[in-house]
Amino acid sequence: MRFEWQQAEDQGGHVSRELHLLRLDDIGRISEQTLFCADVWDPELQAQMADEAPLIRS
C-alpha cells in the first residue's frame, strides 16, 4: 500500500510519502509489515526534489 499525506500551512505545505509492504500467510492474513517512509518534506525540500528527481507515477 502506498500513502501520501499533505498538511497545508500559510508558508506552504508539508508532504510525506509511505510505502507499506505486507506479506500474507496461506489464508490471506497479514503475517508481516514493513514500512518505508520518505520523511516529511517542507516546501523547500519539495521544490528541490521536484527539480532534481521529479516524481513519476504510473
Image (tube, rainbow, N blue to C red):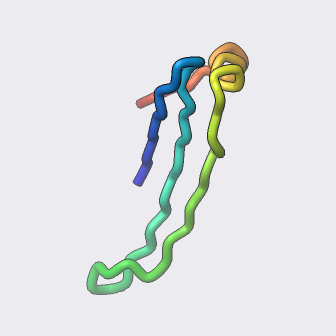
| The furthest residue to the bottom | 26
* Along the viewing direction, whichever of 57 and 9 lies nearer the viewer: 9
Pick the quarter of the image with the N terminus. bottom left
Relative horizontal placement of residue 58, taking residue 12 as reference (left or right): left
Look at 63% across and 40% down and name the residue there. Answer: 40
Relative horizontal placement of residue 39, taking residue 10 as reference (left or right): right
Question: In the picture shown, does residue 32 fall above or below 2?
Answer: below
Look at 45% across and 29% down and name the residue there. Answer: 57
Look at 48% across and 34% down and name the residue there. Answer: 7
* Along the viewing direction, whichever of 55 and 43 lies nearer the viewer: 43
* Along the viewing direction, whichever of 29 and 9 lies nearer the viewer: 9
Residue 6 in percent (x, y) is at 46, 34
Residue 51: image quadrant is top right
Question: In the picture shown, does residue 36 fall above or below 11?
Answer: below
Relative horizontal placement of residue 27, taking residue 19 as reference (left or right): left
Residue 31: image quadrant is bottom left
Question: Could you tell me if residue 39 is visible in this image?
Answer: yes
| The furthest residue to the front | 10
Pick the quarter of the image with the C terminus. top left
Look at 44% across and 68% down and name the residue there. Answer: 22
Residue 32 in percent (x, y) is at 49, 78
Residue 42 in percent (x, y) is at 65, 29
Instruction: Count the marks.
Output: 0
Question: Could you tell me if residue 53 is visible in this image?
Answer: no
Question: In the picture shown, does residue 15 fall above or below 9?
Answer: below
Residue 17 in percent (x, y) is at 53, 42
Question: In the picture shown, does residue 31 fall above or below 38?
Answer: below
| The furthest residue to the top | 51
